[in-house]
Image (cartoon, rainbow, N blue to C red):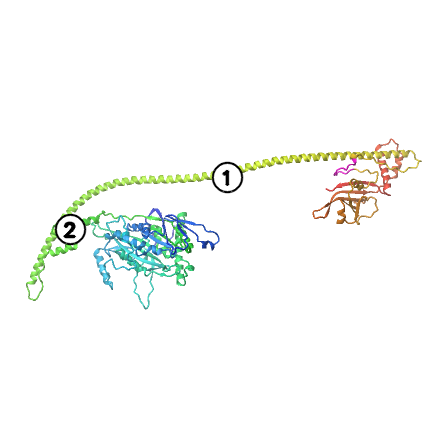
Amino acid sequence: MIRQAKGKTPRRPPPKKPSSNQKDPVGVYCRVRPLGAEDEECCIEVISSSTIQLHAPDGFKTNRNGEYKETQYSFKKVFGVSVSQMELFEYVAKPLVDDLIHGKNGLLFTYGVTGSGKTFTMTGSPGLGGLLPRSLDMIFNSIGPYQAKRYVFKTDDKNGMDVQSEVDALLERQRRDNNLSAPKSSSSRQKLDPEIADMIKPEEASKADGVDEDSSYGVFVSYIEIYNNYIYDLLEETQEDVIKPKPPQSKILREDQNHNMYVAGCMEVEVKSPEEAFQVFWRGQKKRKVANTRLNRESSRSHSVFIIKLAQAPLDADGDTILQDKNQVSVSQLCLVDLAGSERTGRTGAEGTRIREAGNINQSLLNLRTCIEILRENQMCGTNRMVPYRDSKVTHLFKNYFDGEGKVKMVVCVNPKADDYEETLLVMRFAEMTQEVEVARPVDRPICGFTPGRRHRNQAFKEELSRKLEERGGPINRDMSSVINHLVQSLPPLPSSELTDPHDDITLPRLIEALHNRYRIRQMMIEEYNKAANMMKSMLQELDGNLASKGDYIHEQNGKLAEKDKIIQNNKAEIERLEKKNKMQEHKIDILQKTTKIYEDDKRSLRHELDTRDQRLMREQSDKRRMEQRMHGVVTDTQHKWEKECERRVNAMQLEMQNKLWVKDEKLKQLKAIVTESKTPGRPEPPPQQTQPKRPSREERLPAKRSASPSPIPTTTPVRPLHRRSRSAGGEKWVDHKPSSNLDLGTVLQPVIPNAIQVSAPSEKALSKCDRYVLTHQEVASDGEIQTKLIKGEVIKTRGGGQAVQFTDIETLKQELTTVPSRKRRSSEGTPANGDRTDVEKRCSVALEMRAGSNMGPGYEHHGITKRRKP
């Protein structure tokens, strides 16, 4: 619910203006001005009758980063440099003038950069009249015979039009002529200014078709300018004061009862000929503000608006006088706008007032572009943004045209020289955007219900009356004033009425008698006139009866035509429905085609992806086959290698078992010797002979491959660990590193390596002369026993030219102190020979170890050698 403030009457909503659902786009035309000099660089090329192309000049490319491509812009019509003013008028302004005569409004404005030919396009020059003088000429050529007398139409102060009788119009004319200090010539063809004489050639005259003959017309013109966003009347007559001149008074915009904008207090002049109308225009043109700038000698500093109002009122039923009804008067207007050119102060060299003028001009043009842009956005996107018409006087004055009060056309004037390229580019973009704005088409005004052809019948009646008077001896001239003069002259002449004597009684009675005769003749003439009028009326009634019957017939035919029209309308509606359906089907077909195209593209891309994957799969399969072959070779090599390794390990195990058997055999031999010695107690024990070990075979002498499992070494003789390896090394030279920090325990468990260089600290010189390296390290183990570690490695050369040691083996030598109890000896002596074999072997082993220990040193024996490979 909307609440209303107290004490205020609700404002009535404005009545909706009649508008059509059909819309027409704003007609935008382009006119190219010729170059000032032939050697100037041109940046505009006319490609076709509706397209132009802009080329970026070389200097513009040099001063910017990046290349600018050539751009094309399309218009409703493009006029090249060779197009005449007449051809431009035929395409652009003539349809607007024709709509003006038929009661419709129109707006035409020129737009462009300063110096692009806008004023020449609108005004022209002698012999080359522009759009404005040609429009005035066409108006008066079309309505000339049907113009009402001056002051029959009278403007009010609220943008309306009053109508008055011819008698009132004559009285007002006399009153205005008496108020003028210097009476003007009543002739409409006054002496013209030589600057505007002969603007239009007679053979170039235009005329509208279908003018309503049953109406009377009146033409009113007004001329205003918008300077610094203020409105001034250029036709206002002010008294010039030389001592203290008064500045012109600005006007304000108001809204009439039909919500149309108008300039309040603007002077509207009624004109009766194109010469008079253009004379009024030229009088205001001289007051328009122009200035000399660097780019234009006469640059317009304001927007000028020339408004042509056409008042139209129907004749009465007799077709003789104008119908005295204000509501029947229709007013249409045509606005011809010459917008000031957009300019840059840096190029024009403006200073002071000129800078302010240029700023206001550019601001008003910017507001116009903003309004057009928002209108376009509302129409294309369906938004409802408020259009800022009130931000500028130009847009506020013409807001009704963009809301559907008439047609809108724009002539874009461009200068093809390269210096105006940037400004021309902005003008082209604005023109392209303006073409997308649509304006509602105004509906036709209703026609009054009088019978058409009234003026023609009235003229026929006057001609018939003149003919009858001719038959009765009346004047041949059909002019009513001459007929009245002839009737007056046919009366008897008046006698001389000069009185010379105050006692004259003859003159006055004679004058009275003459006046009685004249009165009697006048009555006879009136009776004859009434008889003729009654006869004519009867004839007219008969004609009206015939016309009524014909009217009924016409009405019947109109009814049939209405039925036909209904059928046609139904057919049109059906055609429109089918056209909409056809468009909808075409739209669906387009959608399906686009969808099909998308699916085909997807299918093509998927097929390409499938082919790519197939190729990738084939490559992977080929790689897999190659990998299988390679792995098969690797497996074969590995299998062969492991077969050799297994064979080597088997040989090592066989050698180890042989060594164990050899050790057992040796133990058995020593046991046999002990047993033999125990049988002869009184015989001294001979020293044990050194048992010559069995010489290994050739296969056993071959160096075996290194293995993680240690090879068994016989313990019967004190074999030094590296002695056999050094012999099997085939003459390799060793570096025997014995640090001075070793335990000096005087043990014999220190291997002696032949062909070795003994050092206490390794040096580069010693390493360069040897192939192998051994580090001797002695320490006390965790169980308190002494052990020696032999850390062996190979000397290799590095890329830098030095030597490095890569460790390969670690051998551990350990000694431990053993004490053999005497009871074992005694028990061994008393044990029969056929005792337990295991105990005998243990005792023999202990004795053998004691015997071997006696050779290695007092209180020490060889316990074993542990050999490990460095991982």
Please tell me whether the stretch drawn in magenta is mainly helix, strand or loop.
loop
* Mark 2 crowd level (few <14, some 14–19, many ≥20, 10 Å Cα): many
842 or 343: nearer the viewer? 343
Residue 316 horizontal/vertical position (percent): 22, 50
Q: Secondary structure at mark 1?
A: helix
Residue 8 visible? no
Quarter-wise, where is residue 278 in the image? Answer: bottom left
The residue singled out by tag 1 in the image is 605
Q: Residue 492 location in percent, x, y? A: 9, 57
Question: Residue 119: x percent and y percent?
Answer: 34, 56
- Amino acid type, label 1: Ser
Q: Is residue 575 left or right of residue 600?
A: left
Q: Between 863 and 140, which is closer to the camera in this rendering? A: 140
Where's residue 514, x and y in %?
Answer: 8, 59
Q: Is residue 243 magenta?
A: no
Q: Can you identify the residue that label 2 sits on?
A: 466
Is there a contact, CB below 8 Å, between mark 2 and mark 1?
no
Residue 441 seen from this side: yes
Q: Which residues are magenta?
A: 700-711
Which residue is at the far front? 39
Q: Secondary structure at mark 2?
A: helix
Task: Give the amino acid at mark 2.
Answer: Ser
In the image shown, does 417 or 309 lie closer to the viewer?
417
Quarter of the image for residue 268 reads bottom left
Horizontally, is 837 left or right of 429 in the view?
A: right
In terms of sequence position, does the residue under pointer 2 or pointer 1 come before the other?
2
